[in-house]
């Protein structure tokens, strides 16, 4: 019998259960029960240090970017006002007022033949234009019978109690000119104050006049008398350009009335065609040939560029030759009468086309360049 058959005949013996062999504790369990070592404490400290260092670097980056952005915003000429410039020189206004001479406020600012169109829209009306060197600003005024105040804004929805012709323009101009014409503390007595004449806004060109355009938005017959009354602070100090009945006396501020200003009422309010007046009509360029306007009643003429000159083709290099000839014809007609000229609604986009037209208008001889973008107008790229 083979071996396999023998194994089958052997009696089966009862078996006892084999005790389970305990499994060795895992390394994780052992580590949980082990006391913390020096290496684990050092690792935690290093981790905390890295987190703190990362946080500090993040804070420094945020602060640096914020400061850079703030600097860029301050240097934006559209937002730049002279008070900001003064503060950046490192002296508070209370200290600064005791350290300046009268010309410091506009020192180093070169006046330019630029008209700040809708100037009241700027973050700081008047001062933003002044800092850019603009020699002309425009204010739209609204009169309401309830208080007789002249409010400044493009439409009724933009008006507010604190934005008035006096507060935004007349008072700042008077205050600035008072500083410019204060009695010198050294070398001149009070009675000699007028020896050098009245100094204008700009220290670099004290004889340069400042053009204040006032656009009447409410009915001219009732608004005009209020505007004339508002000019009194400038009038009493002799700051206004004036027609004295026979001659034009150039002043450091020249007022131009536009919008709903009634021409005939403007004349009669100042004694007729030969009367004395210190405000002038913004005449239409297309009506200069009528002989109605001369330096006794108008010192600037204005035209809608698109309507009178035409649309500029993009990428064509600006105005065509025929357009330039139209502009030169208008300028010649105005200058023959002693009247300056300004065009509004010039191209504003593309920027390259806008800049080309600006340069061509100046080359043709316009007296004021109508601009909305002060930064672009003063960048020198045209």
Image (spheres, rainbow, N blue to C red):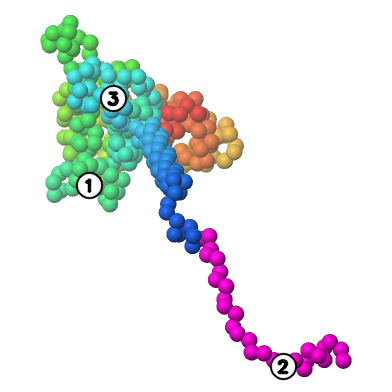
Main SS class of the magenta portion in the image: loop
The residue to which callout 2 is attached is: 11
**Residues marked 2 and 3 touching at CB (< 8 Å):** no
Between discs 2 and 3, the one toward the N terminus: 2
Q: What element carries label 2?
A: loop
Q: What element carries label 3?
A: loop
Between discs 2 and 1, the one toward the N terminus: 2
Between discs 1 and 3, the one toward the N terminus: 3
Q: How far apart are marks 1 and 3 (CA)?
A: 33 Å
Instruction: Tell me if mark 2 has few (under 14), some (14-19) or many (20+) residues whose alpha carbon lies within 10 angstroms of its own.
Output: few
> Which of 11 and 162 lies nearest the eye of the viewer?
11
Residue at the outermost top position: 187
* Mark number, residue 90: 3
Q: Is residue 31 above or below residue 223?
A: below
Residue at x-position 22% and y-position 47%: 160
Residue at x-position 53% and y-position 36%: 352
Q: Percent x, y for residue 55?
A: 41, 43
**Residues marked 2 and 1 touching at CB (< 8 Å):** no
Instruction: Tell me if mark 1 has few (under 14), some (14-19) or many (20+) residues whose alpha carbon lies within 10 angstroms of its own.
Output: few
Q: How far apart are marks 2 and 3 (CA)?
A: 112 Å
Residue at x-position 57% and y-position 76%: 20
The residue to which callout 1 is attached is: 160
- Mark nearer the viewer, 2 or 3: 2
> Which of 99 and 120 lies nearest the eye of the viewer?
99
Q: What stretch is highlighted in magenta?
A: 1-28
* Mark number, residue 179: none
């Amino acid at each position: 019998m083979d071996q396999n058959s023998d194994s089958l005949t052997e009696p089966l013996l009862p078996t006892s259960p084999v005790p389970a062999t305990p499994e060795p504790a895992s390394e994780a369990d052992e580590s949980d029960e082990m006391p913390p070592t020096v290496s684990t404490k050092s690792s935690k400290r290093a981790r905390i240090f890295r987190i703190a260092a990362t946080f500090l670097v993040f804070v420094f980056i945020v602060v640096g970017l914020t400061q850079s952005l703030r600097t860029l915003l301050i240097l934006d000429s559209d937002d730049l006002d002279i008070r900001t410039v003064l503060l950046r020189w490192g002296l508070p206004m209370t200290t600064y007022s005791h350290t300046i001479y009268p010309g410091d406020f506009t020192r180093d600012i070169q006046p330019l033949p630029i008209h700040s169109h809708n100037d009241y829209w700027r973050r700081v009306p008047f001062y933003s234009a002044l800092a850019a060197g603009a020699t002309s600003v425009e204010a739209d005024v609204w009169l309401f019978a309830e208080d007789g105040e002249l409010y400044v804004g493009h439409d009724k929805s933009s008006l507010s109690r604190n934005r008035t012709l006096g507060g935004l323009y007349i008072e700042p101009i008077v205050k600035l000119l008072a500083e410019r014409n204060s009695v010198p503390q050294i070398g001149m007595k009070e009675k000699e104050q007028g020896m050098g004449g009245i100094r204008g806004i700009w220290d670099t060109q004290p004889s340069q006049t400042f053009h204040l355009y006032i656009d009447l938005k409410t009915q001219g017959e009732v608004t005009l008398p209020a505007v004339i009354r508002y000019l009194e602070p400038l009038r009493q100090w002799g700051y206004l350009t004036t027609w004295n009945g026979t001659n034009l006396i150039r002043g450091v501020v020249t007022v131009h009335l536009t919008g709903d200003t009634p021409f005939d009422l403007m004349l009669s309010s100042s004694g007729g065609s030969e009367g004395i007046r210190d405000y002038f009509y913004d005449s239409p360029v297309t009506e200069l040939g009528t002989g109605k306007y001369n330096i006794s009643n108008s010192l600037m003429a204005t035209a809608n560029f698109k309507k009178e000159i035409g649309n500029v083709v993009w990428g064509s290099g600006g105005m065509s030759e025929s357009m330039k000839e139209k502009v030169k014809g208008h300028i010649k007609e105005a200058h023959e009468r002693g009247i300056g000229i300004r065009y509004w609604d010039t191209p504003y986009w593309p920027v390259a086309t806008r800049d080309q037209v600006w340069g061509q208008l100046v080359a043709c001889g316009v007296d004021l360049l109508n601009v909305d973008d002060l930064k672009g107008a003063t960048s020198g790229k045209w």
